[in-house]
Amino acid sequence: MLFSLVGDALWIIALSIMASATRMAWGRMTPETKVPLQFALNGKPTLRLKRNLALLLIPTAAFFLGLALVAFNRNAAASLEQSVILFGVRATAAALIAVGHLRWLKAALELLESEGALKS
């Protein structure tokens, strides 16, 4: 039970970090801004989406992944070994998704800044 609650707390922290960074980036862009979503190996953007979709895509996907992991955790047998393993999966996934989102957002903002597409 304790592992489940701590896992929930870690997901809440990760989602709040992503939401905060997304909100900051949202305010620096106009609604028409095309945000780079995917980058090639040479650093050039290969896929761009409008601000609304691009900025909300990763946090929304992370939210639904977190819900799926919570449902799986609640339906799993309550042995100590399984609880520890599921906690490890949830904690690792929350951290990796948050770090990945922040790295992508930093790269996207740097590119948009160099293109002059951001508000000051």
Image (cartoon, grey):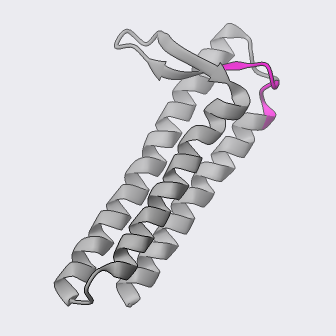
Magenta stretch holds residue 29:
yes
The percent position of residue 68, horizontal first and vertical second, equals 43, 63
Q: Residue at the spot x=39%, y=13% of the render?
A: 40
What residue is at 81 percent from the left and 25 percent from the top?
Answer: 31
Looking at the image, is 9 positioned above or below residue 47? Answer: below
Outermost residue to the left: 81
Quadrant containing the N terminus in the rendered view? bottom left
Is 81 located above or below residue 52 in the figure?
Answer: below
Residue depicted at x 38% and y 50%: 96
Q: On the picture, is 69 further left or further right than 13?
A: left
Indicate whether residue 48 is drawn in magenta: no
> Residue 42, how many percent across, how many down?
37, 9
Residue 118, visible in the rendered structure:
yes
Percent of width and height locating residue 111? 59, 16
Residue depicted at 55% across the width and 65% down the height: 13
Report the magenta residues as a range: 27-34
Q: Relative to residue 84, is residue 32 depicted above or below?
A: above
Quadrant occupied by the C terminus? top right
User: Looking at the image, how many numbered discs can be counted on the residues?
Assistant: 0
Locate residue 15: give its quadrant.
bottom right
Q: Residue reaching furthest front?
A: 75
Q: Identify the main secondary structure in magenta.
A: loop
Q: Answer above or below: position of 6 versus 102.
A: below
Answer yes or no: is residue 120 visible: no
Residue 112: x percent and y percent?
65, 17
